[in-house]
């Protein structure tokens, strides 16, 4: 144990040190060997300075660009090519992998479930976040309430899965120790094996992500609500509007842009959802989603072509958001 | 000013609704935490919400035989204890399992053969007879007792030592620290260049980074893994190494890091940097002495993001580090426990809480920076 900690500390220090050394070292070398101080003529100095300062941006931005190209840009194109190849990426098979996928029952279930996730999770998280943000806005214990709702954001999807699997626990004999079954029995119902109860088990898995993401929506929307001009609220109160009218007719229209941003951000996250399904059901009982289906193809069936085809499908789903973001960013920086 | 014209009932309803929602969001974690410190037996037989109530238990006691009797005066006595003093309290008892509530604790009960039996609340057993006892086999006595709630750290000891969670903790730390620091360093330099240096292609790189913000990392798994395998074939490296995971996390975290930091750095006062440049400071010096110290809030925001993300990640660790070979991280270990020890809630709850402990501490203590990062990352 001790030796392991020492090794780990050494490895961590080495990694951090080496990466810091790169930047310090390369800038030092640049200043040392392309210094203009030894030159006498102004023209030579100027030329040397320009050369040095022309190289420097690439030292600054180069590592980032390199890493991004290797880990994100190249893989998009590589996956596209793999998706047109066979299971070992040896031969070209055209669109066969896509044809297989769309005819496969697991894939169809995954698509259906992903669509359900996409409809339910962002909507519910945003709605809950909005309601909690609004209701705690002027509450004296609002800060504590917000922190408690926000806390699940720190918990891993796997940890959250354990938490909720415990809630959904079903023994079938003796006293039920799962909270959900205890509540159901207290209300006079029969305990259920929730995890395998189709199709409701999908909803129960979504609850986990809603539980995590509501805090995110609440924080962003809370800031937006605080930004709503006071005089618009006061005017509404003067006109005799009640709380519901203020919320729906004054607050929501003014923060609508933020609501869309929150909704989109959660949507992107939902498209990639993997850990919860992997840990809770591994896609059994019709709970499959695309990312887990892809993992199955890739690491259980060992099929590079089919796995890549599913990855490309996920990629295509986020592309509209990507294009929109790029357009907006280019307009801002123009 | 709002509450003046509101009904007290409406205010009460609002408090109640918020309280209910907060309860709904807190109970799941609370249940896990409470369960993790309950002892194994009560955890599997009763819900965690009963943890503070004493548990009722039905048990059997076999009396000692005639050998144990002592004589005091004319009376023959057999004495014993049912349980350790203070471990529980006795409620009722009887001589048949169907008749548990026949006698109260403390009653002196005369049995059919004329002997007198007493069981007291603290577990004392006393049996008196005017004739010498002759029984060679102990009688059975059935009793109901209340077990006070007990809390224990045994589950934690077990999960840390024998279930590999302690080792996984160090592995997670080994993955997380460099995978947090390296992208910050790379991104800080890139962000400075994109905010304050002039070079061809700057806007293209910026647009590219915004686009990469939403690229799902699933797309990278196969190509990067194949690249690692290829490189390991050429250079004899391990295909699944800490280095590989650090760089993968760096790649996946970099778009957000550059985006956040560039936005922040672009908002720094231009005059400070320009005057420093006029004084002959190079970009590197301006970056190191002015921009970096000023950017600490943004750096902290991203650091928390990346730290939580890497610490809680499962997929990247599964694919690029794998399970087994002593490199399993905590999330992967927890998934494995879910599969292999699915019903052993004492292991799962304490294991899960250990994985959450560090993120929760980081999160609670640095929530301000985290919120600031969230706002900068999504509202812009």
Image (cartoon, rainbow, N blue to C red):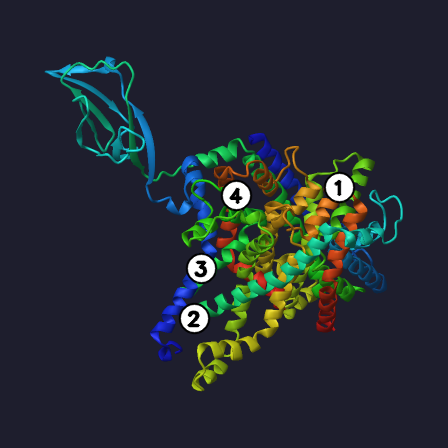
Separation of marks 1 and 2 at Cα, in angstroms: 55 Å
Q: Which mark is residue B22?
A: 3
* B15 left or right, relative to B193: left
The numbered mark, 1 or 2, whose residue comes first in the sequence reads 2
The numbered mark, 4 or 3, whose residue comes first in the sequence reads 3
Question: Where does label 2 land, which residue?
Answer: A138
For residue B147, above or below residue A193: above
Badge 2 local density, few (<14 within 10 Å), some, or many (20+)?
Answer: few
SS type, badge 1 = loop
Given residues B345 and B195, the one toward you in this image is B345
Residue A108 quadrant: bottom right
Q: Could you confirm whether marks 3 and 1 are on the same chain? A: no
Residue B13 place in picture, x, y as percent: 39, 69
In the image, farthest residue toward the bottom? A239
Q: Chain of mark 3?
A: B
* B268 left or right, relative to A305: left
Q: Could you confirm whether marks 3 and 2 are on the same chain? A: no
Q: Which mark is residue B352?
A: 4
Looking at the rendered image, the disc whose residue lies closer to the viewer, 4 or 2, is 4
Residue A53 place in picture, x, y as percent: 78, 60
Given residues A333 and B54, the one toward you in this image is B54
SS type, badge 2 = loop
Question: Where does label 1 land, which residue?
Answer: A301
- The residue that appears at 63% across and 41% down in the rendered structure is A13
- The residue that appears at 16% across and 22% down in the rendered structure is B114
Looking at the rendered image, the disc whose residue lies closer to the viewer, 3 or 1, is 1
């Amino acid at each position: 144990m001790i030796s392991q900690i020492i090794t780990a500390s050494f490895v961590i220090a080495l990694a951090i040190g080496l990466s810091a050394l790169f930047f310090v070292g390369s800038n030092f070398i640049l200043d040392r060997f392309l210094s203009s101080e030894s030159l006498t003529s102004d023209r030579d100095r100027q030329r040397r300075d320009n050369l040095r300062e022309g190289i420097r941006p690439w030292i600054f931005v180069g590592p980032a660009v390199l890493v991004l190209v290797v880990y994100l840009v190249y893989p998009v194109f590589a996956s596209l090519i793999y998706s047109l190849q066979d299971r070992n990426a040896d031969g070209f098979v055209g669109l066969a992998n896509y044809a297989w996928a769309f005819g496969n029952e697991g894939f169809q279930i995954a698509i259906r479930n992903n669509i359900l996730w996409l409809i339910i999770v962002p909507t519910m998280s945003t709605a809950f976040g909005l309601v909690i943000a609004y209701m705690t806005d002027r509450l004296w214990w609002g800060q504590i309430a917000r922190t408690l709702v926000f806390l699940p954001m720190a918990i891993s999807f796997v940890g959250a899965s354990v938490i909720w699997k415990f809630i959904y626990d079903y023994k079938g004999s003796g006293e039920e120790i799962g909270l959900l079954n205890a509540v159901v029995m207290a209300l006079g119902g029969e305990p259920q094996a929730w995890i395998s109860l189709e199709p409701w088990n999908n909803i129960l898995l979504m609850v986990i992500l809603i539980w995590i993401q509501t805090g995110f929506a609440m924080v962003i929307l809370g800031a937006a609500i605080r930004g709503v001009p006071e005089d618009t609220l006061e005017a509404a109160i003067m006109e005799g509007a009640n709380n519901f009218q203020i919320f729906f007719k004054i607050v929501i229209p003014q923060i609508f842009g933020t609501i869309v941003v929150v909704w989109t951000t959660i949507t992107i996250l939902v498209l990639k959802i993997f850990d919860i399904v992997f840990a809770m059901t591994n896609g059994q009982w019709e709970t499959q989603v695309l990312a887990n289906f892809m993992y199955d193809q890739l690491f259980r069936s060992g099929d590079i072509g089919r796995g890549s085809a599913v990855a490309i499908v996920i990629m295509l789903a986020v592309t509209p958001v990507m294009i929109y973001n790029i357009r907006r960013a280019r307009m801002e920086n123009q | 000013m709002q509450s003046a014209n509101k009904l007290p009932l409406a205010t009460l309803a609002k408090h109640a609704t918020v309280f209910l929602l907060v309860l709904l969001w807190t109970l799941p974690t609370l249940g896990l935490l409470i369960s993790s410190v309950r002892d194994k037996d009560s955890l599997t037989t009763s819900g965690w919400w009963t943890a503070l109530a004493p548990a009722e238990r039905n048990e059997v006691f076999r009396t000692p035989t005639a050998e144990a009797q002592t004589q005091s005066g004319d009376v023959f006595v057999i004495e014993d204890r049912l349980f350790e003093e203070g471990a529980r309290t006795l409620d009722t008892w009887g001589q048949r399992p169907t008749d548990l509530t026949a006698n109260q604790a403390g009653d002196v009960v005369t049995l059919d053969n004329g002997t007198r039996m007493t069981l007291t609340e603290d577990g004392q057993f006393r049996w008196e007879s005017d004739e010498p006892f002759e029984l060679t086999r102990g009688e059975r006595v059935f009793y109901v007792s209340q077990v006070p709630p007990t809390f224990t750290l045994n589950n934690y000891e077990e999960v840390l030592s024998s279930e590999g969670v302690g080792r996984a903790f160090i592995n997670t730390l080994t993955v997380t620290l460099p995978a947090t620091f390296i992208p910050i360093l790379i991104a800080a330099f890139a962000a400075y260049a994109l905010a304050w240096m002039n070079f061809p292609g700057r806007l293209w790189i910026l647009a590219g980074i915004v686009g990469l913000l939403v690229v799902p990392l699933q797309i990278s798994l196969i190509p990067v893994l194949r690249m690692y395998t290829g490189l390991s074939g050429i250079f004899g490296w391990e295909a699944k190494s800490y280095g590989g995971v650090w760089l993968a996390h760096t790649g996946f975290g970099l778009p957000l890091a550059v985006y956040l930091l560039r936005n922040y750095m672009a908002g720094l006062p231009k005059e400070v940097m320009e005057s420093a440049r006029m004084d002959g400071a190079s970009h590197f010096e301006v970056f190191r002495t002015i921009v970096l110290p000023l950017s600490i809030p943004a750096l902290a925001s991203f650091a928390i993001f990346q730290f939580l993300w890497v610490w809680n990640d499962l997929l990247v660790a599964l694919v690029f580090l794998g399970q087994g070979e002593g490199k399993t991280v905590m999330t992967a270990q927890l998934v494995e426990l879910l599969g292999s020890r699915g019903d052993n809630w004492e292991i799962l709850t304490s294991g899960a809480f250990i994985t959450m402990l560090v993120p929760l501490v980081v999160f609670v203590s640095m929530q301000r920076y985290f919120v600031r990062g969230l706002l900068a990352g999504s509202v812009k």
